Image (cartoon, rainbow, N blue to C red):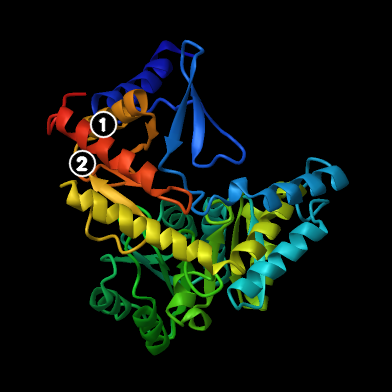
Amino acid sequence: MRKEDKQVFEGAVATIRDEGRYRVFADIMRERGRFPHATIRRDDGTTADIVVWCSNDYLGQGQSPEVIDAAHAALDKVGAGAGGTRNISGTTSYHVDLEQELASLHGKEGALLFTSGYVSNDATLSTLAKLFPNLWIFSDAQNHASMIEGIKRAKCECRVFRHNDIQHLEALMNEAPADAPKLIAFESVYSMDGDTAPIEAICDLAEAYGAMTYLDEVHGVGLYGPTGGGVAERDGVMHRVDFIEGTLAKAFGTMGGYVTGPAAAIDAIRSTASGFIFTTSLAPSVAAAALESVRIVRECPHLRDRLQDRAERLKALLRDAGLPVMSESTTHIVPVLVGDAARCKKISDILLEEHGIYVQPINYPTVPRGTERLRITPSPFHDDELMDRLVASLKAVWAMCPVHLTA
């Protein structure tokens, strides 16, 4: 590598350091059966017990004995890997059964598995534009990076509407030719602010303008609705949404992504999406674990009830302590505004090093500069004692750190 080339890389990292948002990944080992407790290994080789407060394993299903047993059973039966792409040799009964379960969960005719939620969004949205050459996509301003990337790769007409602004969305839709195919892409739960989309109003608008709807339920599936179908199920509008995309890596505690929708559409995506065709399939043990987890979560509304109880209690405790919980959140996500990258990282570091509390700083590009925050995600297993300790520690550290720090 040329010296000049190396300097480009060094310069990119230096810029991130100067902004106070350079990350050093913590070496953490989750411990089976002890979630949310874990162990951190320090640089000197010593270890310490910590409590995880920022996991997206929202229901602790990654530690479920039944889910782990299902993975073990599949591993013992068929081995470690899938053996190839789904088109060649990577399809098993576990994959087929999981797709059927996911389609049923969302009330759709079909479902298609991907290796991650990022890939399912990217591959599906870019493929829809290939299937509809004159497609217009209308995208919420706060959509996830995977949706944005898929839309960029689609190279079609795209209009971005202000977050959850129905009037702005309609104004933009009026710019499109009446006979042009249209798609509205949005999320149910926006994972950084914790607010939700007006799904019913968007569906009303879609029907009026003849548009398809694409809903990302990544942070809602498993957590809302009578059977965990997501915010759309909770709001009674799941049947009105054309495509529902989700993940297996959050409420279901494993990994992978998927999209559900009409059978003909899912078949067309399966047959044309490069992000599906050319990627090795999920390991059968992962698919088996995810299948068991989906079945458990569908039948356990008490997990969802407990999660909401924990989130509401924590928000109240933080507000009572004078800490700036972001008011936008109406969900299980508890964002605490810091507003400075260096300060946010410093607070996170002290919480981990001195209090055994693991909550990562969220900064640009995940959120806009000036809105840096701690994104706290309580689970059904974070009891009152752990919550009281978190609030006391956070209040103490907050007072230690000045409003602005230099990186």
Q: Nearer the viewer, residue 101 or 85?
A: 101
The residue positioned 39% from the left and 63% from the top of the image is 189
Measured as percent of width and height from the top left, residue 14 is found at 31, 21
The residue positioned 34% from the left and 81% from the top of the image is 201
Label pair 2/1, CB-CB below 8 angstroms: yes
Residue of label 2:
338
Structural distance between the alpha carbons of marks 2 and 1: 9 Å
When the figure is inspected, residue 289 is found, relative to residue 25, above or below; the finding is: below
Residue of label 1:
347
Measured as percent of width and height from the top left, residue 128 is found at 54, 67
Q: Amino acid at mark 2?
A: Val
Q: Is residue 266 left or right of residue 198?
A: right
Q: Nearer the viewer, residue 111 or 372?
A: 372
Looking at this view, name the residue that lies furthest to the bottom.
208
Name the N-terminal-most of marks 2 and 1: 2
The residue positioned 67% from the left and 77% from the top of the image is 263
Query: In which quadrant of the rendered view does residue 163 lie?
Result: bottom left
Measured as percent of width and height from the top left, residue 162 is found at 25, 66
Q: Amino acid at mark 1?
A: Ile
The residue positioned 47% from the left and 27% from the top of the image is 49
Q: Nearer the viewer, residue 233 or 45?
A: 45
Question: Does residue 210 appear anywhere in the picture?
Answer: yes
Label 1 sits on a secondary structure element that is helix
Measured as percent of width and height from the top left, residue 359 is found at 37, 37
Label 2 sits on a secondary structure element that is loop
